[in-house]
Amino acid sequence: MTLFEKIVAREIPAQIVFEDDEVIAFHDVNPQAPVHVLIVPKRVIARLAETNESDRQVLGKLILTAAKVARDLGLGESGYRLVINSGPDAGESVPHLHVHLLGKRALAWPPG
């Protein structure tokens, strides 16, 4: 079981900001910005590189949920960044697709 599966199963506590039947969103325990929320599908998808056409709905749900959470957390005015890491060179540390929502500080470009 991945760390995220354990959070979904409530085996590990998390500061949850949104949840429905398909996704869960919670604050990252190692934040890289004043606001750092992870949006995770409850169904395990290892990484973005392994998605296919059948994942279209959940992929859209992740982005729409990120936008909702950003609004709920007051990030609309200042802006925010969404990040999806796919594979070790991208910094993927948990093999379960997730979106990072980062905000409340200036974010440099290019990242990394």
Image: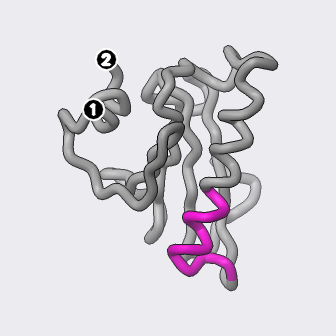
Residue pointed to by mark 2: 1
Element on which disc 1 rests: loop
Left or right relative to 6: residue 100: right
Identify the residue shown where x is 43% and y is 27%.
94
Q: In what quadrant of the picture does the N terminus appear?
A: top left
- Disc 2 vs disc 1: which is toward the camera? 1
Identify the residue shown where x is 39% and y is 53%.
26
Residue toward you, 37 or 92: 37
Q: Is residue 22 above or below residue 36?
A: above
Q: How is the image coloured?
A: one colour
Say few, some or many: other residues with alpha carbon within 10 Å of mark 1 (under 14 / 14 to 19 / 20 or more). few
- Marks counted in the figure total 2
Q: Quadrant of residue 58?
A: top right
Residue pointed to by mark 1: 9
User: Is 12 inside the magenta-drawn segment?
Assistant: no
**Residue most extreme to the front:** 21
Q: Quadrant of residue 76?
A: bottom right
The percent position of residue 106, horizontal first and vertical second, equals 63, 74
Amino acid type, residue under disc 2 in the picture: Met
Element on which disc 2 rests: loop
Left or right relative to 62: residue 88: left
User: Is 73 inside the magenta-drawn segment?
Assistant: yes
Say few, some or many: other residues with alpha carbon within 10 Å of mark 2 (under 14 / 14 to 19 / 20 or more). few
The percent position of residue 96, horizontal first and vertical second, equals 49, 25
Left or right relative to 22: residue 3: left
Residue toward you, 21 or 37: 21
Of the two numbered discs 2 and 1 on the same chain, state the one appearing first in sequence: 2
The percent position of residue 64, horizontal first and vertical second, equals 69, 53
Instruction: State the extent of the magenta-drawn residues as a range.
Output: 66-76
Q: Disc 2 versus disc 1: distance between alpha carbons?
A: 10 Å
Q: Is residue 43 above or below residue 72?
A: above
Amino acid type, residue under disc 1 in the picture: Ala
